[in-house]
Image: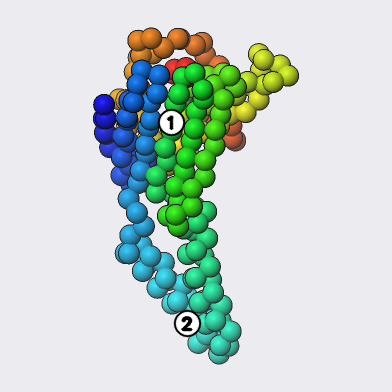
Amino acid sequence: MEEEMSFSDIYGGRLALQRRCYSPSCREFCLSCPRLSLRSLTAVTCTVWLVAYGLFALCENSMILSAAIFITLFGLLAYLHFVKIDQETLLIIDSLGIQMTSSYASGKESTTFIEMGDVKDIIINEAIYMKVIYYLCILLNDPLEPHRISQVVPVFQLERGRQSDRLPHVPDRDPPGMPTRGRCSAHPGPHSVATRAHSSA
């Protein structure tokens, strides 16, 4: 069974979320965004070159033009390889664990696996980023102190939903068959202000 929905991130860009259910104990969520547009790439390249030509006209130093070429090329490669994510996948196997895969525009893939025994809870965290936003996080148990949280792992880097887009998709209660967890407090960053429990793995 496959379901698909679309919504906007905090910048107004469109995101597509696909949900696939392979079995009652195996589910996959795939979040994707539009690929890098030629218009954006052209705009950034023209801006860098206009600034370089302006400095060249003032200083009459050809090294400025050479530096602009290297900045454009290496900046684009770094952006495609380390920043621009085209697709993120979350695979949940109840008896095994959670696998998170990020696919970058350059073709690089980054995979993280979390054993189910290390998962304390899965929550929707509230944070302030020029406005109130919501994002999914995984709380990990502390191996030395089971009652404490050792780490807060954001699930989707692309998913930074706006209040108007995310609230309608948050159910009032956990889905049938999912255990209910109490509220917990976690602060993964300086902008995080509150956390509320949503569902458990």
**Residue tagged by mark 2?**
53
State which mark lies toward you, 2 or 1: 1
Q: Amino acid at mark 2?
A: Tyr
Q: Residue at x 36, y 62 (%)?
A: 40
Left of 80 or right of it: where is 149?
Answer: right
Residue 103 at what x, y percent from top left? Answer: 44, 47
Left of 150 or right of it: where is 12?
Answer: left
Q: Is residue 38 above or below residue 52?
A: above
From where the camera sits, is residue 193 visible?
no
> In the displayed image of the protein, which residue is found farthest to the right?
144
> In the displayed image of the protein, which residue is found farthest to the bottom?
60
Q: Residue at x 50, y 28 (%)?
A: 98
Q: Is residue 72 above or below residue 78?
A: below
Quadrant of the image containing the N terminus? top left
Q: Quadrant of residue 180?
A: top left
Q: Amino acid at mark 1?
A: Leu
Query: Alpha-carbon distance for marks 2 and 1?
Result: 49 Å
Q: Quadrant of residue 10?
A: top left
Determine the secondary structure under disc 2.
Answer: helix
Residue 134 at what x, y percent from top left? Answer: 43, 31
- What numbered label is drawn on residue 82? none
Residue 68 at what x, y percent from top left? Answer: 52, 76
Q: Earlier in the sequence, mark 2 or mark 1?
A: 2
**Residue tagged by mark 1?**
91
Determine the secondary structure under disc 1.
Answer: strand
Q: Residue at x 44, y 17 (%)?
A: 199
Total residue callouts: 2
Residue 120 at what x, y percent from top left? Answer: 56, 18
Q: How is the protein colored in the picture?
A: rainbow
Q: Residue at x 33, y 60 (%)?
A: 37
Crowding at label 1, few (<14), some or many (≥20) Cα neighbours within 10 Å?
A: some
Q: Is residue 62 above or below residue 159?
A: below
